[in-house]
Image (cartoon, grey):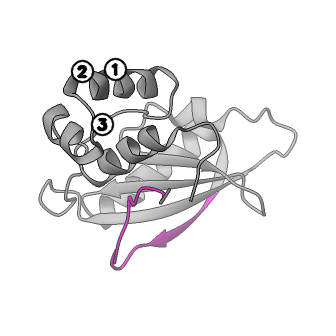
Amino acid sequence: MTVPGLEPLDQSIVQELAADGRRSFTDLAERVGLSVSAVHQRVRRLEQRGVILGYTARLDGEQIGLPLTALISLTPNDPAAPDDYPQRIQHITEIESCYSVAGDESYILLVRVASPLGLEDLLRRIREAAKVSTRTTVVLSTPFEGRSPTL
């Protein structure tokens, strides 16, 4: 598949980094058939253009004491209120992702907490901060997540 606006070599670099964001420039250069300096320049350009948004470590919630994952849907208590919910809740560290969605709810949050009591406390803090009603779905298992789009 060809991606508009991405040269084939840049597309190869993006695919390699999506598979392993810790890949060295040397390894990347060997895999795409360029010099190390050429790969370095291309990666910098992809970062500057916003194609590559960053590099992160994926953590195991169980191992770091946050075994409970939930999806929380937000519905405004007052439909006439300003749509500033993300700003009202961005300080809450248990919220991993915030998605603006179409449908009955305005936003869906992905959260990770230590326990059901922690979830109950988090829901209270979200409701107070954003003045919303919530609907919560607890995740039982995660067969896969965080996959990069295929180019």
| Residue shown at 17% from the left, 64% from the top | 62
Q: Amino acid at mark 1?
A: Gln
In the image, residue 94 lies in the stretch drawn in magenta = no
Nearer to us in this view, 68 or 40 = 40
Q: Position of residue 13 (x, y in %)?
A: 36, 42
Query: How many residues crowd mark 3 within 10 Å: few (<14), some (14–19), many (20+)?
Result: few
- The amino acid on which the numbered mark 2 sits, given as a three-letter code, is Ser
Q: Earlier in the sequence, mark 3 or mark 2?
A: 2
Mark 2 neighbour class, 10 Å CA radius: few under 14, some 14 to 19, many 20 or more:
few
State yes or no: discs 1 and 3 in contact (Cβ < 8 Å): no
**Magenta run includes residue 142:** yes
Q: Would residue 22 be visible to someone looking at this image?
A: no
Query: Can you say whether 36 is above or below 65 in the image?
Result: above
- In this rendering, would 14 be left or right of 84? left
Q: Nearer the viewer, residue 43 or 50?
A: 43
| Mark sitting earlier along the chain (1/3) | 1
Residues at marks 1 and 2, CA–CA distance in whole angstroms? 6 Å
Q: Position of residue 19 (x, y in %)?
A: 29, 54
Task: Examine the residues drawn in magenta and state their main secondary structure.
Answer: loop
Segment tinted magenta in the rendering: 134-149
Percent coordinates x, y for residue 34 in the rendering:
27, 34
Look at the numbered disc 1 and give the secondary structure of its residue. Answer: helix
Return the mark for residue 145. Answer: none
Question: Which residue is the site of mark 2?
Answer: 37
Q: Which of the two marks, 3 or 2, is nearer to us in this view? A: 2
Q: Can you identify the residue that label 3 sits on?
A: 55
Q: Amino acid at mark 3?
A: Tyr
Secondary structure under the numbered disc 3 in the rendered image: loop
